[in-house]
Image (cartoon, grey):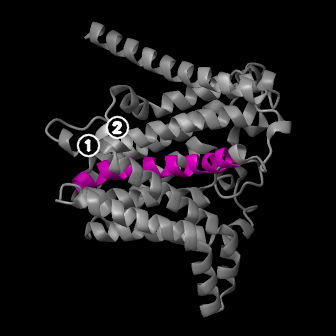
Amino acid sequence: MATMTKGKKNDRLYFIDAIRAWAILMMLQGHFVTALLADVYRDNGNLFFSIWSYFRGVTAPLFFTVSGFIFTFLLVRQYDQGLANPRVKKGIKRGVQLMAIGYLLQIRFAMVFIGGINDSYDIVHVLQCLGLSIILIVLVYLVSFKFKRAVFSVLLCSMTILLFIFKSSYEQWDYSFIPEFFSNYFTKANGSVFTIVPWFGFASFGGFLAVVFSNNHAKPNFYRNAIITIVCTGFILVANSYEIIRDLKELTGLQFFQDTLQNTYLFARLGVILFVFAFFVLFRQYFKSKLLLKIGQKTLPIYVLHSIMLYGSITGFGLSRFFYHSLSPTSVILGVTFFVVLVSATVMIVDGKMKTIKIWFR
């Protein structure tokens, strides 16, 4: 989260930085285990592995939600300014930056030096999808800023619902008429891992939450009421998403509700995300560790470094090249502990050195 301007520091929601720190650390261990754990130990019948696997599936949605929350929370602080809102320019710049870094990490420079480029450079991964999601939030804001904030929040929440409900329909569309570079944002047919549907739905939901918090977080008893509402909503989404969609299908007879039944896990994951929010909001006074907050503010360099070290992004030489699906659980536990500490510590040390250099030059 970017540093807020002087005089508004009390508006900072530290628990959001803490959530993002937790999400990036869970991403590090999740990617490490997925890449290096031997196949023989990947047993969904094992209670510990199945629990780990489930929560690993929640990490990316949580990260998209928190990223949408952080950007939108800063954006709406000067809600009525439209194009003059400095967060509009910063958001577009940030979105383009994330997309550019995402593509850069997928280029194998050894091939560039011999006059070629690897075929997979244009697939869409998390950074490209997240960057485009931020740009889309900016566009929704520009469409709605002349109205009340409630309109902006309703639009964001509605997009989440529609993207999740119509996911099956979007996946069946033919995108062959679109150049592959752009169609990769909509289909996984060419190898894309993240597509704008449904992932923008998580970012827009984070934006919706951000507007609610921005409007109300200074009010008496807001956090108490927010925790109760978040937990109740989360329980409904986790326990009853399938039943709600099924009842809508029976009530309306519309086929797309039948197709949506296989995507109710998206709503269930929103429910789990709400439980995580409720936990961090409830214990927000205990999540002000400088190290934890710093990690939450440095997620991009942490992601970049982990990609280079684990997957061999840019260089082609990473841990997964040498130990792919070959380690025992004991080796993975020891390795992932060292990996998470090494990546986080390296980024923190380099960031401190860079600040020292900047001060020296000044």
Q: Nearer the viewer, residue 360 or 222?
A: 222
- For the N terminus, the image quarter is top left
Query: Callout 2: helix, strand or loop?
Result: loop
Choose the circle earlier in sequence order: 1 or 2.
Answer: 1
Q: Which residue is mark 1?
A: 12
User: Foreground mark, 1 or 2?
Assistant: 2
Position of residue 147 in the picture relative to residue 153 (left or right): left
Give the Cα separation between the discs numbered 1 and 2: 13 Å
Q: Determine the image quadrant of residue 349.
A: top left
**What predominant SS class does the magenta segment belong to?**
helix
Three-letter amino acid code of the residue under disc 2: Phe
Q: Which residue is mark 2?
A: 287
Tell me whether the residue at label 1 lies in contact with that at label 2, contact meaning CB atoms closer than 8 angstroms.
no
Where is residue 296 shown, x and y percent of the image?
42, 35
Q: For the magenta stretch, what is the residue range?
A: 50-79
Q: Determine the image quadrant of residue 152.
A: bottom left
Query: Callout 1: helix, strand or loop?
Result: loop
In the picture shown, does residue 220 fall above or below 303?
below
For label 2, the crowd category at 10 Å Cα-Cα, with few meaning under 14, some 14 to 19 and many 20 or more, is some
- Which residue is painted at 71% across and 27% down in the image? 332
> Is residue 349 at all visible to an observer of this figure?
yes
Check residue 128 in the rendering and tell me which mark sits there, or answer none: none
Where is residue 362 shown, x and y percent of the image?
25, 11
Q: Is residue 131 magenta?
A: no
> Residue lying furthest front in this view?
47
Position of residue 94 in the picture relative to residue 79 (left or right): right
- Which residue is painted at 58% across and 68% down in the image? 164
Where is residue 322 shown, x and y percent of the image?
80, 21
